[in-house]
Image (cartoon, rainbow, N blue to C red):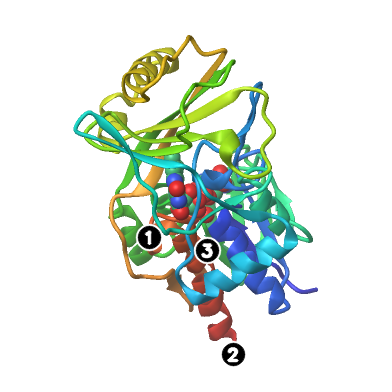
Amino acid sequence: MTVPIAIIGAGIAGLSAAQALQKAGHSVHLFDKGHGSGGRMASKRSDAGALDLGAQYFTARDRRFVEQVQQWVAAGWTAQWKPQLYNYRDGALSPSPDEQIRWVGVPRMSAITRGLLKDVTVNFGCRIAEVFRGKQYWHLQDTEGCSHGPFSRVVIAVPAPQATPLLAAAPKLAAVAAGVQMEPTWAIALGFEPPLETPMQGCFVQDNPLDWLARNRSKPGRDEQLDTWVLHATSNWSKQHLDLPKEEVIELLRGEFAELVGCVVPPPAFALAHRWLYARPAGNHEWGALADADLGLYACGDWCLSGRVEGAWLSGQEAARRLLEHLE
Ligand SMILES: Cc1cc2nc3c(=O)[nH]c(=O)nc-3n(C[C@H](O)[C@H](O)[C@H](O)COP(=O)(O)OP(=O)(O)OC[C@H]3O[C@@H](n4cnc5c(N)ncnc54)[C@H](O)[C@@H]3O)c2cc1C
Protein backbone atom coordinates (compact mmCIF):
# COMPACT_ATOMS: atom_id res chain seq x y z
CA MET A 1 0.00 0.00 0.00
CA THR A 2 1.30 3.47 -0.80
CA VAL A 3 0.48 5.96 1.93
CA PRO A 4 -0.94 9.15 0.40
CA ILE A 5 0.06 12.74 1.12
CA ALA A 6 -2.64 14.86 2.79
CA ILE A 7 -3.25 18.40 1.57
CA ILE A 8 -5.42 20.69 3.68
CA GLY A 9 -7.03 23.40 1.53
CA ALA A 10 -8.34 23.09 -2.04
CA GLY A 11 -7.58 26.68 -3.04
CA ILE A 12 -5.14 27.37 -5.85
CA ALA A 13 -2.07 26.75 -3.61
CA GLY A 14 -3.28 23.33 -2.43
CA LEU A 15 -4.29 22.30 -5.94
CA SER A 16 -1.00 23.51 -7.39
CA ALA A 17 0.87 21.32 -4.87
CA ALA A 18 -1.51 18.42 -5.57
CA GLN A 19 -0.88 18.63 -9.30
CA ALA A 20 2.92 18.70 -8.92
CA LEU A 21 2.92 15.78 -6.47
CA GLN A 22 0.62 13.69 -8.64
CA LYS A 23 2.78 14.39 -11.64
CA ALA A 24 5.72 12.98 -9.68
CA GLY A 25 3.76 9.78 -9.07
CA HIS A 26 2.39 10.38 -5.55
CA SER A 27 -1.18 9.95 -4.48
CA VAL A 28 -2.74 12.88 -2.67
CA HIS A 29 -5.87 13.36 -0.59
CA LEU A 30 -7.31 16.86 -0.22
CA PHE A 31 -9.54 18.25 2.51
CA ASP A 32 -11.48 21.51 2.40
CA LYS A 33 -13.96 23.00 4.82
CA GLY A 34 -15.87 24.58 1.94
CA HIS A 35 -18.43 22.89 -0.29
CA GLY A 36 -16.40 23.48 -3.43
CA SER A 37 -12.86 24.28 -4.48
CA GLY A 38 -11.20 27.62 -5.02
CA GLY A 39 -11.16 29.31 -1.63
CA ARG A 40 -10.60 33.00 -2.32
CA MET A 41 -10.59 32.22 -6.04
CA ALA A 42 -14.06 30.66 -5.90
CA SER A 43 -17.26 32.06 -7.42
CA LYS A 44 -20.42 32.37 -5.39
CA ARG A 45 -23.58 30.93 -6.87
CA SER A 46 -26.44 33.38 -6.40
CA ASP A 47 -29.84 34.33 -7.82
CA ALA A 48 -27.92 36.65 -10.16
CA GLY A 49 -25.64 33.85 -11.44
CA ALA A 50 -22.12 32.88 -10.38
CA LEU A 51 -20.23 35.92 -9.12
CA ASP A 52 -16.49 36.36 -8.63
CA LEU A 53 -16.48 37.90 -5.16
CA GLY A 54 -12.84 37.21 -4.28
CA ALA A 55 -9.99 37.31 -6.80
CA GLN A 56 -11.15 39.51 -9.69
CA TYR A 57 -8.51 38.66 -12.25
CA PHE A 58 -4.92 37.56 -12.14
CA THR A 59 -1.68 38.47 -13.80
CA ALA A 60 1.22 36.21 -14.77
CA ARG A 61 4.82 37.36 -14.50
CA ASP A 62 6.88 34.31 -13.52
CA ARG A 63 7.78 32.17 -16.54
CA ARG A 64 6.43 28.98 -14.90
CA PHE A 65 3.09 30.59 -14.17
CA VAL A 66 2.90 32.10 -17.65
CA GLU A 67 3.27 28.57 -19.08
CA GLN A 68 0.65 27.23 -16.70
CA VAL A 69 -1.82 29.94 -17.69
CA GLN A 70 -1.28 29.09 -21.37
CA GLN A 71 -2.26 25.49 -20.57
CA TRP A 72 -5.39 26.68 -18.77
CA VAL A 73 -6.24 28.80 -21.82
CA ALA A 74 -5.77 25.76 -24.09
CA ALA A 75 -8.01 23.72 -21.77
CA GLY A 76 -10.73 26.40 -22.06
CA TRP A 77 -10.62 27.29 -18.34
CA THR A 78 -9.10 30.75 -18.70
CA ALA A 79 -9.43 33.75 -21.00
CA GLN A 80 -8.21 37.31 -21.15
CA TRP A 81 -10.41 40.03 -19.70
CA LYS A 82 -10.05 43.41 -21.40
CA PRO A 83 -12.19 45.76 -19.32
CA GLN A 84 -12.79 49.41 -20.01
CA LEU A 85 -10.90 50.62 -16.97
CA TYR A 86 -11.36 53.80 -15.02
CA ASN A 87 -9.67 55.52 -12.14
CA TYR A 88 -11.48 57.44 -9.42
CA ARG A 89 -9.29 59.99 -7.66
CA ASP A 90 -9.93 63.33 -5.94
CA GLY A 91 -13.63 63.03 -6.66
CA ALA A 92 -13.18 62.58 -10.42
CA LEU A 93 -13.53 59.62 -12.76
CA SER A 94 -11.20 59.22 -15.71
CA PRO A 95 -10.60 56.45 -18.23
CA SER A 96 -7.43 54.58 -17.35
CA PRO A 97 -6.43 52.16 -20.10
CA ASP A 98 -3.21 50.22 -19.52
CA GLU A 99 -1.09 47.46 -21.07
CA GLN A 100 -1.62 44.92 -18.28
CA ILE A 101 -2.76 41.46 -19.39
CA ARG A 102 -5.55 40.28 -17.09
CA TRP A 103 -6.76 36.68 -16.89
CA VAL A 104 -10.01 35.28 -15.50
CA GLY A 105 -11.52 31.81 -15.18
CA VAL A 106 -14.29 31.05 -17.70
CA PRO A 107 -17.22 30.91 -17.43
CA ARG A 108 -16.42 31.83 -13.82
CA MET A 109 -13.30 32.15 -11.70
CA SER A 110 -13.84 28.78 -10.03
CA ALA A 111 -13.51 26.99 -13.40
CA ILE A 112 -9.76 26.79 -12.90
CA THR A 113 -9.71 25.01 -9.56
CA ARG A 114 -12.63 22.85 -10.69
CA GLY A 115 -10.56 21.78 -13.66
CA LEU A 116 -7.60 20.99 -11.42
CA LEU A 117 -9.77 18.73 -9.24
CA LYS A 118 -9.94 16.10 -11.97
CA ASP A 119 -8.52 12.76 -10.74
CA VAL A 120 -7.94 14.13 -7.22
CA THR A 121 -9.49 12.61 -4.09
CA VAL A 122 -11.08 15.36 -2.03
CA ASN A 123 -13.29 15.59 1.04
CA PHE A 124 -15.36 18.78 0.95
CA GLY A 125 -17.22 20.12 3.98
CA CYS A 126 -14.43 18.79 6.18
CA ARG A 127 -12.71 21.30 8.48
CA ILE A 128 -9.47 19.94 9.87
CA ALA A 129 -8.92 20.87 13.52
CA GLU A 130 -5.74 18.96 14.32
CA VAL A 131 -2.76 17.46 12.53
CA PHE A 132 -0.89 14.88 14.60
CA ARG A 133 1.77 12.29 14.10
CA GLY A 134 1.56 8.69 15.24
CA LYS A 135 4.60 6.43 15.41
CA GLN A 136 5.25 6.60 11.70
CA TYR A 137 2.43 8.39 9.94
CA TRP A 138 0.32 11.51 10.13
CA HIS A 139 -3.38 11.66 10.99
CA LEU A 140 -5.91 14.48 10.73
CA GLN A 141 -8.79 15.10 13.06
CA ASP A 142 -11.77 17.09 11.77
CA THR A 143 -14.16 19.28 13.77
CA GLU A 144 -16.78 16.50 13.76
CA GLY A 145 -14.32 14.29 15.64
CA CYS A 146 -13.55 12.02 12.66
CA SER A 147 -10.00 10.92 12.16
CA HIS A 148 -8.40 10.62 8.69
CA GLY A 149 -5.17 8.84 7.79
CA PRO A 150 -2.60 7.48 7.68
CA PHE A 151 -0.65 9.97 5.56
CA SER A 152 3.06 9.99 4.81
CA ARG A 153 3.28 13.79 4.77
CA VAL A 154 0.99 16.77 5.23
CA VAL A 155 0.83 19.99 3.21
CA ILE A 156 -1.16 22.78 4.88
CA ALA A 157 -2.46 25.19 2.21
CA VAL A 158 -4.76 27.53 4.15
CA PRO A 159 -4.45 31.23 5.16
CA ALA A 160 -1.76 31.86 7.81
CA PRO A 161 -4.09 32.41 10.81
CA GLN A 162 -5.84 29.12 10.01
CA ALA A 163 -2.52 27.34 9.39
CA THR A 164 -1.05 28.30 12.78
CA PRO A 165 -2.95 25.78 14.97
CA LEU A 166 -2.54 23.06 12.32
CA LEU A 167 1.25 23.53 12.48
CA ALA A 168 1.43 22.82 16.24
CA ALA A 169 3.67 19.77 15.64
CA ALA A 170 6.32 22.10 14.17
CA PRO A 171 6.44 25.06 16.60
CA LYS A 172 8.98 27.01 14.53
CA LEU A 173 6.72 26.94 11.46
CA ALA A 174 3.70 27.74 13.63
CA ALA A 175 5.52 30.81 14.96
CA VAL A 176 6.27 32.05 11.43
CA ALA A 177 2.62 31.62 10.38
CA ALA A 178 1.43 33.31 13.59
CA GLY A 179 3.49 36.38 12.66
CA VAL A 180 1.65 36.89 9.36
CA GLN A 181 -1.10 39.46 9.47
CA MET A 182 -3.99 39.07 7.07
CA GLU A 183 -6.41 41.86 6.23
CA PRO A 184 -10.19 41.57 5.76
CA THR A 185 -12.28 42.73 2.77
CA TRP A 186 -16.01 43.35 2.57
CA ALA A 187 -17.27 42.47 -0.91
CA ILE A 188 -20.76 43.26 -2.15
CA ALA A 189 -22.59 42.51 -5.39
CA LEU A 190 -25.37 44.72 -6.77
CA GLY A 191 -27.51 43.67 -9.75
CA PHE A 192 -29.35 46.21 -11.93
CA GLU A 193 -32.08 45.91 -14.53
CA PRO A 194 -31.90 47.83 -16.88
CA PRO A 195 -28.09 48.07 -17.07
CA LEU A 196 -26.35 51.15 -15.66
CA GLU A 197 -25.64 53.77 -18.28
CA THR A 198 -21.89 53.80 -18.08
CA PRO A 199 -19.20 52.31 -20.32
CA MET A 200 -17.13 51.48 -17.22
CA GLN A 201 -16.25 47.81 -16.67
CA GLY A 202 -13.66 48.09 -13.94
CA CYS A 203 -12.43 50.91 -11.70
CA PHE A 204 -9.56 51.44 -9.27
CA VAL A 205 -10.82 53.75 -6.54
CA GLN A 206 -8.62 55.99 -4.38
CA ASP A 207 -9.34 57.85 -1.12
CA ASN A 208 -12.72 56.23 -0.62
CA PRO A 209 -14.24 53.38 1.41
CA LEU A 210 -14.32 51.43 -1.88
CA ASP A 211 -11.16 50.41 -3.65
CA TRP A 212 -12.38 48.35 -6.63
CA LEU A 213 -15.47 48.04 -8.86
CA ALA A 214 -16.04 45.41 -11.55
CA ARG A 215 -18.87 44.73 -13.94
CA ASN A 216 -19.11 40.97 -13.65
CA ARG A 217 -20.67 40.27 -17.04
CA SER A 218 -17.96 42.18 -18.89
CA LYS A 219 -15.73 39.19 -18.18
CA PRO A 220 -15.60 36.58 -20.96
CA GLY A 221 -18.12 33.73 -20.92
CA ARG A 222 -20.57 35.27 -18.43
CA ASP A 223 -24.21 35.30 -19.45
CA GLU A 224 -26.04 36.85 -16.48
CA GLN A 225 -29.33 38.62 -17.13
CA LEU A 226 -28.71 41.37 -14.59
CA ASP A 227 -26.01 43.99 -14.84
CA THR A 228 -24.18 42.85 -11.72
CA TRP A 229 -21.33 44.80 -10.15
CA VAL A 230 -18.85 43.50 -7.59
CA LEU A 231 -17.53 46.15 -5.22
CA HIS A 232 -14.65 45.75 -2.75
CA ALA A 233 -14.14 47.95 0.28
CA THR A 234 -10.62 48.90 1.39
CA SER A 235 -9.08 46.79 4.13
CA ASN A 236 -9.19 49.77 6.52
CA TRP A 237 -12.90 50.33 6.00
CA SER A 238 -13.50 46.58 6.24
CA LYS A 239 -11.62 46.43 9.56
CA GLN A 240 -13.62 49.32 10.95
CA HIS A 241 -16.92 47.74 9.88
CA LEU A 242 -16.02 44.09 10.43
CA ASP A 243 -19.08 43.17 12.48
CA LEU A 244 -21.66 45.37 10.79
CA PRO A 245 -24.75 43.43 9.60
CA LYS A 246 -24.63 42.62 5.88
CA GLU A 247 -27.67 44.82 5.07
CA GLU A 248 -25.92 47.86 6.52
CA VAL A 249 -22.68 47.11 4.66
CA ILE A 250 -24.67 46.89 1.42
CA GLU A 251 -26.42 50.18 2.16
CA LEU A 252 -23.23 52.09 2.98
CA LEU A 253 -21.20 50.77 0.04
CA ARG A 254 -24.12 51.17 -2.38
CA GLY A 255 -24.25 54.84 -1.36
CA GLU A 256 -20.53 55.31 -2.05
CA PHE A 257 -20.91 53.55 -5.41
CA ALA A 258 -23.87 55.74 -6.42
CA GLU A 259 -21.82 58.86 -5.67
CA LEU A 260 -18.79 57.91 -7.69
CA VAL A 261 -20.04 55.88 -10.67
CA GLY A 262 -21.14 58.92 -12.64
CA CYS A 263 -24.63 57.78 -13.73
CA VAL A 264 -28.04 57.27 -12.15
CA VAL A 265 -28.06 54.26 -9.82
CA PRO A 266 -31.58 52.90 -9.23
CA PRO A 267 -32.33 50.57 -6.29
CA PRO A 268 -30.66 47.24 -7.11
CA ALA A 269 -32.80 44.26 -8.11
CA PHE A 270 -30.32 42.03 -6.32
CA ALA A 271 -27.75 42.55 -3.55
CA LEU A 272 -25.51 40.39 -1.42
CA ALA A 273 -22.51 40.87 0.84
CA HIS A 274 -19.63 38.60 1.70
CA ARG A 275 -16.98 39.18 4.35
CA TRP A 276 -13.50 37.83 3.63
CA LEU A 277 -11.89 37.70 7.05
CA TYR A 278 -8.47 36.75 5.65
CA ALA A 279 -8.55 38.37 2.24
CA ARG A 280 -4.88 39.19 1.76
CA PRO A 281 -1.61 39.15 3.69
CA ALA A 282 -0.63 42.64 4.89
CA GLY A 283 2.75 42.35 3.09
CA ASN A 284 4.80 40.16 0.77
CA HIS A 285 7.23 37.46 1.98
CA GLU A 286 9.94 35.48 0.29
CA TRP A 287 9.62 32.12 1.97
CA GLY A 288 8.14 30.34 -1.04
CA ALA A 289 6.79 27.69 1.31
CA LEU A 290 7.49 26.57 4.88
CA ALA A 291 8.95 23.12 5.46
CA ASP A 292 10.03 20.81 8.25
CA ALA A 293 11.28 18.13 5.92
CA ASP A 294 12.37 15.72 8.68
CA LEU A 295 8.91 15.77 10.17
CA GLY A 296 7.20 15.79 6.75
CA LEU A 297 5.12 18.89 7.41
CA TYR A 298 4.78 21.72 4.87
CA ALA A 299 2.82 24.96 4.55
CA CYS A 300 2.06 27.03 1.49
CA GLY A 301 -0.32 29.72 0.31
CA ASP A 302 -0.28 33.28 -0.99
CA TRP A 303 1.01 34.49 2.39
CA CYS A 304 4.37 32.75 1.74
CA LEU A 305 4.97 34.99 -1.30
CA SER A 306 2.52 37.64 -2.50
CA GLY A 307 -1.19 38.04 -1.83
CA ARG A 308 -2.10 37.10 -5.36
CA VAL A 309 -3.22 34.08 -7.36
CA GLU A 310 0.22 33.82 -8.93
CA GLY A 311 1.93 33.89 -5.52
CA ALA A 312 -0.38 31.17 -4.20
CA TRP A 313 0.20 28.94 -7.23
CA LEU A 314 3.98 29.38 -7.05
CA SER A 315 3.92 28.65 -3.32
CA GLY A 316 2.09 25.35 -3.94
CA GLN A 317 4.74 24.42 -6.50
CA GLU A 318 7.49 25.28 -4.03
CA ALA A 319 5.95 23.15 -1.24
CA ALA A 320 5.80 20.20 -3.66
CA ARG A 321 9.37 20.81 -4.83
CA ARG A 322 10.72 20.82 -1.30
CA LEU A 323 8.78 17.70 -0.40
CA LEU A 324 10.02 15.83 -3.48
CA GLU A 325 13.60 17.06 -2.98
CA HIS A 326 13.65 15.47 0.46
CA LEU A 327 12.59 12.11 -0.95
CA GLU A 328 15.49 11.91 -3.39
C1 LIG B 1 -11.56 40.18 -2.05
C2 LIG B 1 -10.34 39.60 -2.69
C3 LIG B 1 -9.85 40.11 -3.88
C4 LIG B 1 -8.72 39.57 -4.48
N1 LIG B 1 -8.31 40.05 -5.67
C5 LIG B 1 -7.27 39.46 -6.30
C6 LIG B 1 -6.91 39.83 -7.61
O1 LIG B 1 -7.58 40.65 -8.23
N2 LIG B 1 -5.84 39.23 -8.19
C7 LIG B 1 -5.10 38.27 -7.55
O2 LIG B 1 -4.15 37.73 -8.13
N3 LIG B 1 -5.46 37.86 -6.31
C8 LIG B 1 -6.51 38.44 -5.68
N4 LIG B 1 -6.87 38.02 -4.44
C9 LIG B 1 -6.01 37.08 -3.73
C10 LIG B 1 -6.19 35.64 -4.21
O3 LIG B 1 -7.56 35.30 -4.22
C11 LIG B 1 -5.43 34.74 -3.24
O4 LIG B 1 -4.09 35.16 -3.15
C12 LIG B 1 -5.43 33.26 -3.62
O5 LIG B 1 -6.66 32.83 -4.13
C13 LIG B 1 -5.05 32.47 -2.36
O6 LIG B 1 -5.04 31.08 -2.63
P1 LIG B 1 -4.65 30.05 -1.48
O7 LIG B 1 -4.77 28.70 -2.06
O8 LIG B 1 -3.33 30.46 -0.89
O9 LIG B 1 -5.71 30.27 -0.31
P2 LIG B 1 -7.30 30.09 -0.30
O10 LIG B 1 -7.88 30.43 -1.61
O11 LIG B 1 -7.77 30.85 0.89
O12 LIG B 1 -7.52 28.53 -0.08
C14 LIG B 1 -7.48 27.95 1.20
C15 LIG B 1 -8.53 26.87 1.30
O13 LIG B 1 -8.39 26.23 2.56
C16 LIG B 1 -9.65 25.95 3.11
N5 LIG B 1 -9.47 25.84 4.57
C17 LIG B 1 -9.11 26.80 5.45
N6 LIG B 1 -8.99 26.28 6.70
C18 LIG B 1 -9.28 24.96 6.59
C19 LIG B 1 -9.34 23.89 7.53
N7 LIG B 1 -9.05 24.06 8.83
N8 LIG B 1 -9.70 22.65 7.07
C20 LIG B 1 -10.00 22.44 5.76
N9 LIG B 1 -9.98 23.43 4.83
C21 LIG B 1 -9.60 24.67 5.24
C22 LIG B 1 -10.53 27.11 2.65
O14 LIG B 1 -11.90 26.73 2.60
C23 LIG B 1 -9.96 27.40 1.26
O15 LIG B 1 -10.68 26.73 0.23
C24 LIG B 1 -8.03 38.51 -3.84
C25 LIG B 1 -8.52 37.97 -2.66
C26 LIG B 1 -9.69 38.50 -2.09
C27 LIG B 1 -10.25 37.86 -0.85
Q: Residue at x 39, y 63 (%)?
A: 304
Q: Is residue 146 above or below residue 62?
A: above
For disc 2, the marked residue is 328
Q: Secondary structure at mark 1?
A: loop
**Lower position in the chain sequence, tag 3 or tag 1:** 1
For disc 3, the marked residue is 313
Type of amino acid at the residue the image marks with label 2: Glu
Apparent side of residue 177 relative to residue 47 in the rendered image (left or right): left
Q: Position of residue 195 (x, y in %)?
A: 56, 21
Apparent side of residue 30 relative to residue 233 in the rendered image (left or right): right
Task: Indicate yes or no: mark 1 CB to ligand 1 under 8 Å.
Answer: yes
Q: Is residue 327 above or below residue 156?
A: below
The image quadrant where one finds the N terminus is bottom right
Q: Give the Cα distance between marks 2 and 3.
A: 23 Å
Q: Residue at x 63, y 37 (%)?
A: 144
Kindly indicate the quadrant of the structure image that contains residue 152.
bottom right
Type of amino acid at the residue the image marks with label 3: Trp
- The residue nearer to you, when weighing 133 against 229, is 229
Q: Residue at x 70, y 72 (%)?
A: 22
Whether residue 151 is visible to the viewer of this picture, yes or no, is no
Whether residue 13 is visible to the viewer of this picture, yes or no, is yes
**Lower position in the chain sequence, tag 2 or tag 1:** 1
Q: Is residue 276 above or below residue 309?
A: above
For disc 1, the marked residue is 306
Q: Give the Cα distance between marks 2 and 1.
A: 29 Å
Q: Is residue 164 above or below residue 124?
A: below
**Lower position in the chain sequence, tag 2 or tag 3:** 3
Q: Position of residue 319 (x, y in %)?
A: 51, 71
